[in-house]
Amino acid sequence: MAPLDPHPSALFERDGTTLHPTLLTRGPWDHGFLHGGAVCAAVGWALESVQTDPAMMLSRLTVEIRSMVPLAPLETTATVVKGGRRTKVVESTLAHDGRLLVRAVSQWVRYDADALAAGNGRPAGAPGSRPDHPNDPGARLDMNYPRPGFNCDAVELRPIRGNTEDEGPGLVWVRLRHPVVAGEPTSPSLALMAMADLGVAVGWQRSPAGAAFINPDLTLQLNRPMQGEWVLMASRVHASAAGVGFCETVLSDDAGLFGRVLQSQVEAPEELGIPGIA
């Protein structure tokens, strides 16, 4: 395989329905594998490749990560499994060398864009302004972040409370810095899919036994499209003594609350050796 571009401008390059990850997709668990945000971006791109009706919005996305996704060519599929005038169900998968790694199912619903635009005034309780300066996760030498990589370079983080390096709960503004696929526009819904997995980084906590958690899935639920490029993540972990928990993230933008993310959590094998970040 040819050396990867050390200065990538997008998360993926595309060849038909095959996505080629760039170094911006790398996660901290193992630098040869994708961050969960890049995984969600890949299946999200596949979903949007067949869901092209602008009158429909993403209402729900569930991503099941069956295995760690390597920094290697990824075969995508996408299928409309239920079409309709008011709702549509679309599924997508990621595979490598014929092995299924990720499955996603999404619900798309028809919405009233005119009514949404008419009510676009800033509501009471909308979040405040963003901090002036971004956080630099790569400045923490005790964190094994790849550079370039997803946490430090694919997204911009502006923390209000907490950060992605210290245990949560946390409250952090996030935006995607780069397109998902080179040479293609990134829709607001695709940008949100790429950022949704960061809830476990914003709110991460160790299990009651002191172990790191990993998340094998993600469910995103929305009541309207995201407005603008920034999302405010208010994330916290709810864990039990059974070594199982979930991370809950409330999503807001400059117009107010618009969604939630839930992510299952289970204690990580000791050999991963990462102190509680995902």
Image (cartoon, rainbow, N blue to C red):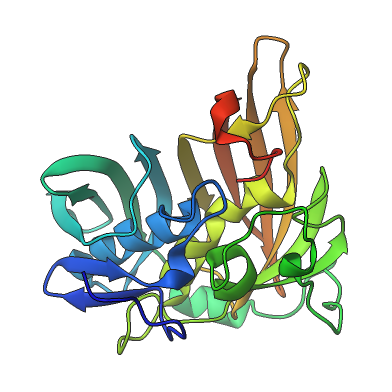
Residue farthest toward the bottom in the current orientation of the protein? 183
Whether residue 176 can be seen here: yes
Q: Is residue 7 left or right of residue 232?
A: left
Q: What residue is rendered at 71% in x and 15% in y? A: 240
From the viewer's perspective, is residue 9 above or below residue 125?
Answer: below
Q: What residue is rendered at 30% in x and 66% in y? A: 45
Q: Nearer the viewer, residue 4 or 46?
A: 4
Please provide percent x and percent y for residue 126: 80, 68
Whether residue 189 can be seen here: no
Please provide percent x and percent y for residue 60: 42, 49
Residue farthest toward the top in the current orientation of the protein? 242
Q: What residue is rendered at 54% in x and 62% in y? A: 195
Q: Is residue 24 left or right of residue 263?
A: left
Which quadrant of the view contains residue 251? bottom right
Please provide percent x and percent y for residue 185: 36, 86
Q: Is residue 115 left or right of residue 61?
A: right
From the viewer's perspective, is residue 267 above or below residue 257?
Answer: above
Image quadrant where one finds the N terminus: bottom left
Q: What residue is rendered at 43% in x and 71% in y? A: 23
Q: Nearer the viewer, residue 107 or 184?
A: 184
Which quadrant of the view contains residue 237? top right
Please provide percent x and percent y for residue 76: 18, 57
Q: Nearer the viewer, residue 53 or 44?
A: 44
Q: Is residue 156 left or right of residue 85?
A: right
Which quadrant of the view contains residue 145? bottom right
Q: How many marks?
A: 0
